[in-house]
Image (cartoon, rainbow, N blue to C red):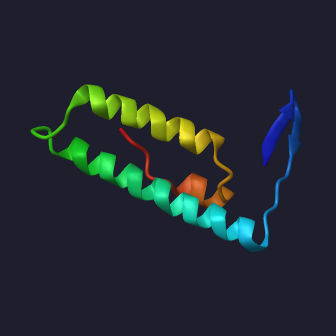
Amino acid sequence: EEAIAKGIRRIVALSGNEATKAIKKAQVIETEVLNVKNTLSNPNTADSKALSKKIIDITEEIAKATLPYWKKEDLPSIP
C-alpha cells in the first residue's frame, strides 16, 4: 500500500521474480538492522557518528524499498 495523493492510497502487489526480490531485500535490510542493534548493545565498539549515518541510511532504504507489508511491520526497530 502506498500513498499517491492526499487521502488516496494504492495497493501494490508483486508476484513471481519481483516478489522473490522483495522478500530477499527485506531479509538483507533485517540483517543490517540487527547488526546495528547488536553494535548499539556494545557501547565500547560503537562509533556514534558512523552508527547515526547507518541508521539514517537504513531508514531511507526501508522507506524507498518495495517490501512485503508484513515484513516491513516486523522489522526490528532501532532504539
Instruction: Give the percent coordinates (x, y) of residue 36.
Output: 32, 46
Q: Is residue 16 left or right of residue 77?
A: right
Rendering quarter of residue 42: top left
Q: Is residue 45 left or right of residue 66?
A: left
Vertical side of 20 occupied by 52: above or below: above
Q: Is residue 69 left or right of residue 13?
A: left
Q: Residue at x 82, y 61 (%)?
A: 13
Q: Residue at x 58, y 53 (%)?
A: 73
Instruction: Give the percent coordinates (x, y) of residue 16.
Output: 77, 74
Instruction: Give the percent coordinates (x, y) of residue 32.
Output: 40, 52
Instruction: Give the percent coordinates (x, y) of residue 66.
Output: 68, 51
| Name of the residue lying farthest toward the bottom | 16
Q: Residue at x 67, y 56 (%)?
A: 69
Rendering quarter of residue 54: top left
Q: How many marks can you see?
A: 0
Q: Residue at x 51, y 38 (%)?
A: 59
Q: Nearer the viewer, residue 25 or 79?
A: 25
